[in-house]
Amino acid sequence: MAEKVLWKTKPVECWTKFKEIARERYTGDGTTTTTSNYRVQGFTASNYKVAGGGEGYAANCANMGLTLEFRRACEGMGYARDLCAYSGAHLGSIFTDKYAFGGSFPKPDLVKRGHTCDTHAKWALIEAEHYGVPFFATDGPLMYEFDSEQTRQNKMDYMVAQELESIEWQEKHTGERFDDEAYIRGLYNNFRSRNLWAQVCILNQNIPAPLDQKSIFSLFVIPFFQGARDECAQQMEILRDEVEDRVKNHIAAVPTERYRFVTTGIPPWHALNTFRYLEKYGAVSVACRYSTDLGTNTTMVEGGREVPIPTLEERGIVLKTREEAIRCAIERRCLYVTKTWRFCGHQGQENDLRQARLWQADGALLHYNRGCEQFSLGLPQIRQALLEHNYDVLIYEGSSTDPRDIDQIRTFDRIDTLMESRGLEKLND
Amino acid sequence: MLAKLEEIYKNRHQYAKDWKARTGGKVLGYFYPYVPEEIVYAAGVLPVRIMGSHEHDNLSAAYIYPMYCPFCRDTLAEGLRGRYSYLDGLACADTCMHMNQVFDWFVLNCGIPRRGTFIANTPANVAGTHARTYLIKEHLEFKKAIEGWVGRVLSDKDLDRGIEIMNRNRQLMRQVYETRKREKPPITGAEAQLMVLTSQFSDKEEHSALLEDILNKELPGRNRDRKTGVRLMIVGSEDDDTAFLKMAESLGVTFVIDDTCVGSRYFWHEVVPGKDRVAAIANHYLDSTPFPTKDWSERRRFAQVLKLAEEYNVQGVVLAQQKWCDPYELDIPSLAARLKERNIPTLFLEFEPTLPRAPFTTRIEAFVEMLCGDEEGLFAESSTVKSGS
Ligand code: SF4
Ligand code: SF4
């Protein structure tokens, strides 16, 4: 634990620009790398507008205090109270025909999405059925450490074949040719954006941390959701330079930093003030696997350290065809297994222990998220491993979007107890 | 003979241990019936489905966050009680994240060597264009791994034998289910479920021999005096709670058909033999009624539920939900709507490993009253459905 010092601080300068770009995903034309009138619901759109989006949109709804209404609407349609928190909020917004950013929910022309947890495709199917529009989902089996080389190959071939099919499907339903050139350019940008994001996250290993968790949660949507855009890749470079500069000049996100947390999984988007509460004690959350990776990989492990996955330019990869590009995108997901959700958490344990060590944490803040079956995998084992390695572990139960599932008073009480037991008093109120 | 099934069910672990002692063979525990048992039988190994026992669980929460489905927590608890120590191998088919977590716990804690651990990766979108190629390749990998484990190559003859064992058992269970279409089914829903569960727990050749006896000697003329009452169907992601079925069937109903993975979905379709045995097996797993986790765009499962409801002259459907099972939860409103279009009322019940008797009794009784068209009753306006015999 660090001594009580007061670091220099200042706001992140490119913040406003990032905020603007993030909003464009839901409101403007900025989501496209080429222009098109089609609204494709889902992750993978390279040259179509994304209407609404799924998880990111639901997170925004929660942050804007809309999810209680949306979740209730979803339950009113007969869906379970314990349904995945993102899907419940998103579907509720559709059922109420109320768009968080104003007006009616934008009707998609097509619904297309990737499926890596048991919920994804069915959630999207309900949306497609609701609007009566074509539906396509690509099945993305997760990698498992015991997979044979052949199985790894089989999984990748399977995913490549589906992605290629999805493009034909898109062309058929839109009558428009898929723009391979734009897609490939987007992929180079995507690798670059994520590489830069990994650099930013790694810079946060420094003491004091140049960024706090709440800011990280605001910034990370750009590399993951819009990283294919030229403008975003450029902005990521500006962000990396700024964070590098903050490190060099010891500019802290939280001037009172004296205790460091790491966290894992999806936060309660409606209760991000939990992170601000920590700061009253000079405690800062400095890294979260969810915001570092978002379920894909941005880093790889080399000699016990996490380093950014190189860009395609750095690897000297020249992509010429659609198939080469798709395979390359899929390989990133499959071959760099820094992060895995898989099963009961022994890989999760390794990842979270490494994160705690590298990001110089004193403790871990674990969100027992009732709203996500994927990012809550193995939590008890992860907790156990962290305790065995002498990290403080603070758990709190909640949901990524449902305010009914969190008891914030109790969470704050727990924070008070832990901090006081470590001899830390509140610095301000 | 039906009593024998009950005995196997109650002593399933002892049954497997005895089988090992008797045959000197290996026992492979598996999670979810997408593991190709044909290949396991071809290797002379006994596949047994790993499942819980509906006992009070104060063990699993230390390993699995209680927002995972009760069925998988119950299964984990059975492992934590040390009751699966006799297993030689473990297999999983990548069916859902909840159960994969339990599989992983078994892998790490059951002391089974790495080479006794198998994954028969199954596509999540069984109706997808590329699912077939992928699954055939993965079944070949599974076969190769099993061959490495048992130390011999599985010939076409071995695979034919595996297919034959499985298909024979499927045919016999279909025959038993056929009798449930009768006005007076000779077998109750709880007994039918015991039959399917024991098929998953025991040597299928022995099970088939028992079924032949049951069909020929026990079922004819059975239950003549039992009142069938309201004919119900149970539909679930999962429902292995035989005690619940027994309780409900004591209230003037009979479950005449089901769509669950411990019921019809497990055995309804046979492997259609083909020159390429592995492809024939893979085709079977893709073409059977999909589990909710794997039933996307086509919603083939709904068609099967509606077909069965009609064929078995069902008056009402119990939608049995394992809390937290998203894929099934996402089906329920659409499925209930489709049943409603056919004037089939539904009762939604949320399951935990152990169920409180009183509230479930009340709900079943209320549902029965509604279905019987009790004109004075609370549900009088819904009395469009004819009452049972
Ligand atoms: S990963 Fe979690 S939040 Fe996303 S769809 Fe699956 S359950 Fe929902
Ligand atoms: S009931 Fe649902 S969540 Fe539970 S193991 Fe089965 S498919 Fe998975």
Image: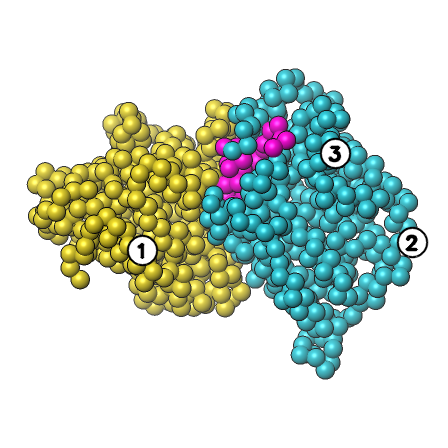
Chain colours: A yellow, B cyan
- Image x and y of residue A252, in percent: 13, 46
Which callout, 3 or 1, points to the residue nearer the camera? Answer: 1
Task: Please tell me the numbered disc located at residue B26.
Answer: none
Q: CA distance from mark 3 to mark 1?
A: 53 Å
Tell me whether the residue at label 2 lies in contact with that at label 3, contact meaning CB atoms closer than 8 angstroms: no
Give the class, few, some or many, for how many residues have Cα within 10 Å of label 3's Cα (few <14, many ≥20). Answer: some
Q: Which residue is mark 2?
A: B221
Looking at the picture, does residue B318 appear above or below residue B154? below
B107 within the magenta span: yes
Left or right of A358 on screen, residue B13: right
Residue hosting label 3? B203
In three-dimensional space, the C-alpha distance between marks 1 and 2, rounded to whole angstroms, equals 66 Å
Residue B236 on image: x %, y %? 63, 54
Which region shows up in magenta?
A: B85-108
Residue type for callout 3? Asp
Can residue A357 be found in the magenta stretch? no
> Would residue A237 be found to the left or right of residue A227 on screen?
left
One can see residue B130 in this view: no
Please, which chain is the residue tagged with disc 2 on?
B
Chain ID at mark 3: B
* Residue at image mark 1: A414
* Residue sitting nearer the eye, B9 or B232: B9
A75 vs A301, left or right, is: right
Q: Are marks 2 and 3 on the same chain?
A: yes
Q: Dot 3: what SS?
A: loop
Q: Going 47% across and 39% down the picture, which residue do you hit?
A: A343
Where on the picture, by quarter, is residue A237? Answer: top left
Amino acid, disc 2: Gly
Compared to residue B98, the image places residue B276 above or below, namely above
Near mark 2 (Cα within 10 A), the count class, few <14, some 14-19 or many ≥20, is: few
- Secondary structure beneath dot 2 equals loop
Q: Residue at x 67, y 33 (%)?
A: B47
